[in-house]
Amino acid sequence: MALSTTNKHPEQAANNDQPPAPDKPKKAAKPAAKAGFRQSMTPLHTWLGLLAGWLLYAMFLTGTVSFFKEEISQWMRPELPFTPTANYSGVADRVAQTLAQQAPTATQWSISLPTQRHPIASAYWRTPEGGRRGFNSGDFDPQTGEQLERHARATRGGDFFYRFHFQLHYMPVMWGRWLAGLAGMFMLVAIITGVIIHKKIFIDFFTFRWGKGQRSWWDAHNLLSVFGLPFHAMITYTGLVTLMLMYMPWGSDAAFRNAEERQALNSKMYLFNDPQPAAGQAAPMVSLQTMIAQGEAMWGPDSVSRVSIDNPGDANARVYVLRSDIQRPNISPHWLQFDGVTGHLLAQQNGVGAAAETRGVLYALHLGRFGDVATRWLYFLSSLAGTAMVGTGLVLWTVKRRARLPDPSKPYFGFRLVERLNIGTIAGLSCGMATMLWANRLLPVELKTRATWEVDVMFIVWAVVALWCFVRPVKKAWLESLGLAVVMLAGLPIVNALTTERGLVTSLFAGDWVFAGLDLTLLALAALHAMLWWRVQRYVPKSATPKKAKPSASHASHKAAPSVASATDAATAATPVAHSSHDQAL
């Protein structure tokens, strides 16, 4: 036993005989600081933007192209001749003659006059055997008055994108408008909370760090948000105002209780008067052009947009001449009412009350029809920046959270769902919208339901691309869907040149800027998608490095004990003779 004791170092033996030191008491954790008002707005901004982001992206993009819906409609009807200096005088009378032959039993006609942006006349008429809501509609050649459906391809044109952006598709119109309104309210709250949570909103306008991964996505989202902040707030709020009586009808219901009062309200906001009872006696009408001339004398040249006739061909015919909203930032109806048989002026409205006037100004600001070409391009670019703002916000949600995943190669289901929905919405919608233009050029002109098929093909391709993204790895899904968008957008000018006589080169030499401008815009959008493809192809996500927890005092003491034991074992192993003698003594 004495030999065994001499093998231990005196200090080591003393340490082994002492009891372990007690753990030091832990300091009480400091209570977490209470989140301030700005910090409390961050989750609201994040989750509202995410939950409504996919629908908002589709609404923003289709609304963006709607600022040029008239030009898109022209491009989608290449059979209509290019007439830069057309004379539209007398077009209302020519269309009225055609309607008198095609719809002799109609109780109401409404004729929209052509403009330089929309060089065809449009009309709808109410008949007892009419279709949905009792109306039929058609487009007419302004030179001859003949219905164009017999000479040009049927298409929804740019009006489809305009309608989709606030009432969607494949569902009842009212449901679509309610969903669009809910998304618009989410967008308005997201804009307000976004302003609150930005401490350096002015500096963000001048800050962009390229190639910095997540930081670059933050900078892009902030820059796009700040750049178009006044426009985004205006376009969102005024979009809600356009359907305010549907979303919040209680005020008008309380103020206007009976049918006569509500009819007076509608007359201040729209030209929607119930037809006067017919006399039952046939009577020829005076020329519509003479009444249009009186309106232009009052409001200015080319200031009349529409002529509406109640009881056409009857002794009690009434004609309404409506002022255009293209040259004024207000859509409140200004109109003149004439006796259709004598041509005498019966009534007029050249102003409305302050509330209706305010609503008319806000509505006009949302549509942007009052502006010239430069103003419409500013609307287009600002709205495109809004689309990119929503898109970068959706992508940023996944980029920010991927770095926090325990295993980025195996994300959880919700994360994978958001990633695939982002790809299907951002890249898939571009493919779908381009497909609609492809279908316009490739579907047979004589196909009876070609206008419906153009829209159906768009949604079919959009759905196929979205489903494809769910079965592909994330990066490959981005590259494949963006690559398809590049090919389809860049190929449209080629298809247009091969299927029509108004290709890009021909249109440039002829000064046909509708066709040339749209082809050039398609090429620019293809280049934008190609740049996105290139950025995604080069992107390498950074893997998260988990932080090591700081050891506690008790953990350190337990960790030190094995170290002493290891030293003892090492010393013991170094004296095999002593161990042998010790065993013999035992």
Image: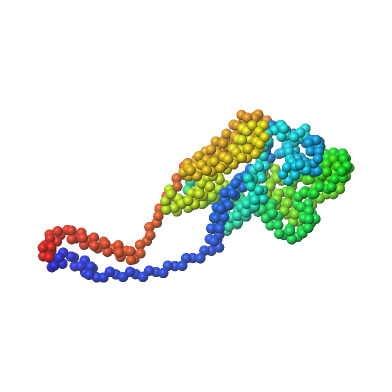
- Can residue 414 be seen from the camera position used here? yes
Q: In this view, does 129 lie to the left or right of 506?
A: right
Q: Position of residue 294 (x, y in %)?
A: 84, 43
Residue in the image at 70% along x and 45% along y: 369
Front in this rendered view, residue 449 or 35: 449
Residue in the image at 64% along x and 47% along y: 171
Front in this rendered view, residue 70 or 368: 70
Q: Position of residue 47 (x, y in %)?
A: 55, 55
Q: Quadrant of residue 292?
A: top right
Q: Position of residue 560 (x, y in %)?
A: 28, 63
Residue in the image at 58% along x and 48% along y: 57
Quadrant assignment for the N terminus: bottom left
Q: Is residue 315 left or right of residue 109?
A: right
Total marks drawn?
0
Q: Position of residue 547 (x, y in %)?
A: 40, 56
Q: Is residue 207 left or right of residue 447?
A: left
Quadrant assignment for the C terminus: bottom left
Front in this rendered view, residue 117 or 270: 270
Residue in the image at 75% along x and 60% along y: 255
Front in this rendered view, residue 88 or 310: 310
- The vertical placement of 390 against 96, above or below, is below
- The vertical placement of 10 against 175, above or below, is below
Q: Quadrant of residue 117?
A: top right
The single residue placed furthest to the front in the displayed view is 129
- Can residue 343 be seen from the camera position used here? no
Q: State the colouring used for the structure image.
A: rainbow
